[in-house]
Image (cartoon, helix red, strand yellow):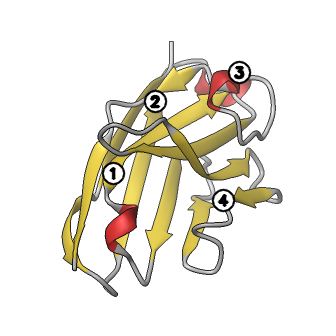
Amino acid sequence: QVQLVESGGGLVQAGGSLRLSCAASGRTFSTVTVAMGWFRQAPGKEREFVAAISRGGTITYYADSVKGRFTISRDNAGNTVYLQMNSLKPEDTALYYCAASRLRVSRTWQEYDYWGQGTQVTVSS
């Protein structure tokens, strides 16, 4: 089984920065997952893709809305994924989820098999 735990959310003013972390654990994590991603969901809105990274870190995808402001990365062991968020805007306010895929690096949440509980990011204007 794979467990994902997010941290690093909080309240920040517009223009500020936050770094989210996602710690993965589980006996089979490194053997069954090939990609990790970040998604977000604001109240009353659908879940939205933010960024994704391959197991080796060589492939990254970003949503157009965050390109140039957010950076996804992972540690050398591959068990922790980060989302550095700069120049935050009020529209970035959402519950941010970390997810892991057994299939591929994807922008589609349905292709992710494991999910964390989420961490809240609130950006004030």
Kindly report which numbered mark, 2 or 1, lies closer to the viewer in this rendering.
Answer: 1
Q: Secondary structure at mark 4?
A: loop
Calculate the distance from the C-alpha at mark 3 to the C-alpha at mark 1.
29 Å
Residue under pointer 1? 94
Calculate the distance from the C-alpha at mark 1 to the C-alpha at mark 4.
15 Å
Residue furthest front in the image? 44
Kindly report which numbered mark, 3 or 1, lies closer to the viewer in this rendering.
Answer: 1
Amino acid on which the number 2 mark rests in the picture: Ser
User: Would residue 56 be found to the left or right of residue 91 on screen?
Assistant: right
User: Would residue 86 be found to the left or right of residue 14 on screen?
Assistant: right
Residue under pointer 3? 32
**Residue in the image at 74% along x and 57% along y:** 61
Local crowd size for mark 4, using a 10 Å CA cut-off: few (<14), some (14–19), many (≥20): some
Foreground residue among 116 and 92: 92
The number of numbered discs placed on residues in the rendered structure image is 4
Amino acid on which the number 3 mark rests in the picture: Val
Say which label, 4 or 2, has the lower sequence index.
2
Residue 30 at what x, y percent from top left? Answer: 66, 30
